[in-house]
Amino acid sequence: WKLYNTFVEQGGISYDVIVNDHQYYRFLTHMFIHADMDHLFGNMIVLFFIGTLVEKKLGRFRYIILYSFGGLVAAITSLGYNRIQDSSTLSIGASGAIFAVVGAMVAIVIFNKREFEEIGIQRLLFFVVITIINGINSQGIDNAAHVGGLFAGLVLGQVLYLGVRNKKQKELI
């Protein structure tokens, strides 16, 4: 466990280590550290079911931009929220970035209904609401990161998808 704790302490995000100690690399590393196998497995399931669809619609490069930027916004949201709460919480995990992917899927489905009729918006929104409620009712869940990632994905996902759609339309001309 000592090695595990050191690993988490060296890669997680908190206001103190990022701002005071200038350890900005943590904006990236926190997305690759998980509390346990259940945490990792849960994130992988969401990426398998939703992430693969989003990557197929956006393309690999745009997907990497979405995931990375979503994780960054999630980290900043977490830091800001925890600073307001006067908390020195250490946060880890890819959930914020994954919520950006989910947010992108929601945006794509809502704004492009005719192209994605097979994907039910009700199920996606149900998943989002249940996950947020679970985060509120559970200890150790960084809901601020989830919400920050979700909003980043809603906006960036639609912007990136419009870029894909416009590129395809230009190719047809």
Image: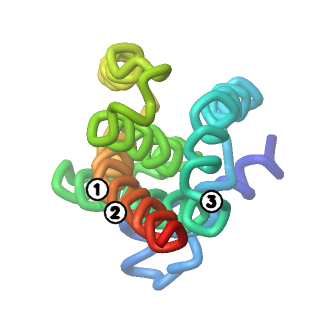
Residue under numbered circle 1:
155
Q: How crowded is mark 1: few (under 14 residues within 10 Å), some or many (20 or more)?
A: some
For the N terminus, which image quadrant? top right
Q: Judging from the image, what secondary structure is the residue with disc 1 in?
A: helix
Q: Can residue 135 be seen in this view?
A: no
Q: Do the residues labelled 2 and 3 touch (CB within 8 Å)?
A: no
Furthest-bottom residue in view?
22
At a point 28% along the width and 35% down the height, the residue shown is 110
Q: Do the residues labelled 1 and 2 touch (CB within 8 Å)?
A: yes
Furthest-front residue in view?
173
Residue under numbered circle 3:
59
At a point 34% along the width and 54% down the height, the residue shown is 158
Provide residue 84's location: percent of width, then percent of height.
16, 55
Q: How crowded is mark 2: few (under 14 residues within 10 Å), some or many (20 or more)?
A: some
- Of badges 3 and 1, nearer the viewer stands 3
Q: Do the residues labelled 3 and 1 touch (CB within 8 Å)?
A: no
**Amino acid tagged 1:** Val
Sequence-first tag of 2 and 3: 3
* CA–CA distance in space, label 2 to label 3: 13 Å
Q: Judging from the image, what secondary structure is the residue with disc 3 in?
A: loop
Q: As displayed, is residue 164 above or below residue 2?
A: below
* CA–CA distance in space, label 3 to label 1: 17 Å
